[in-house]
């Protein structure tokens, strides 16, 4: 199992929060709640020259999305902020529903020449 961003293993085997990285996590949550998209958050981190958890110059959207979804960050940002982000993420989701309330992405397209089973 990989240790999440901002957390470090101590000599005793417990986890502690790195304050400088915790500020980055708080900034990511605040920026997203202010209306920034995942791409805008990535651009902001790159402009501030904040390296990704893997040490690369630029974060990827999936890493930011995973960070925003990880409940381990409740200890840093608080429950209210974390839940607000989860609500915003569900509202911003690009999965569309039809009039009956079914997911549009679940529609299966069948090639006309193929026999139906």
Image (cartoon, rainbow, N blue to C red):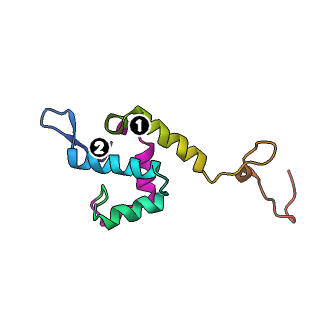
Taking the spot 42% from the left edge, 58% from the top edge, the residue there is 41
In the figure, 109 relative to 117: above or below?
below
Instruction: Say what secondary structure mark 1 lies in.
Output: helix
Tell whether 81 sits left or right of 5. Answer: right
Taking the spot 30% from the left edge, 58% from the top edge, the residue there is 54
- Spatial CA distance of label 2 from label 1 is 13 Å
Measuring from the top left, give residue 76's x and y in whole percent: 31, 38
Q: Earlier in the sequence, mark 2 or mark 1?
A: 2
Pick the front one: 19 or 31: 31
Span colored in magenta: 55-73
Pick the front one: 9 or 58: 58
Tell whether 112 sits left or right of 5. Answer: right
Tell whether 56 sits left or right of 96. Answer: left
Total marks placed: 2
Measuring from the top left, give residue 24's x and y in whole percent: 30, 51
Measuring from the top left, give residue 37's x and y in whole percent: 49, 57
| Main secondary-structure element of the magenta-colored stretch | helix
Disc nearest the viewer among 2 and 1: 1
Measuring from the top left, give residue 109's x and y in whole percent: 79, 58
Residue designated by label 2 = 3
Look at the image and tell me in which quarter the N terminus lies. top left
Q: Which mark is residue 71?
A: 1
Circle 1 residues within 10 Å: few <14, some 14–19, many ≥20: some
Tell whether 65 sits left or right of 1. Answer: right
Taking the spot 58% from the left edge, 50% from the top edge, the residue there is 92
Taking the magenta stretch, the answer to whether it contains residue 56 is yes
Which corner quadrant of the image does residue 82 belong to? top left
């Amino acid at each position: 199992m990989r240790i999440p961003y901002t957390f470090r293993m101590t000599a005793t085997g417990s986890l502690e929060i790195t304050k400088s990285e915790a500020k980055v996590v708080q900034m990511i949550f605040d920026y997203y709640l202010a209306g920034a998209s995942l791409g805008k958050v990535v651009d902001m981190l790159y402009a501030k020259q904040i390296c990704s958890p893997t040490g690369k110059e630029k974060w990827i959207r999936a890493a930011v999305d995973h960070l925003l979804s990880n409940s381990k960050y409740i200890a840093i940002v608080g429950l209210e902020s974390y839940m607000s982000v989860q609500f915003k993420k569900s509202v911003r989701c690009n999965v569309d529903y039809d009039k009956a309330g079914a997911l549009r992405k679940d529609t299966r397209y069948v090639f006309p020449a193929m026999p139906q089973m």
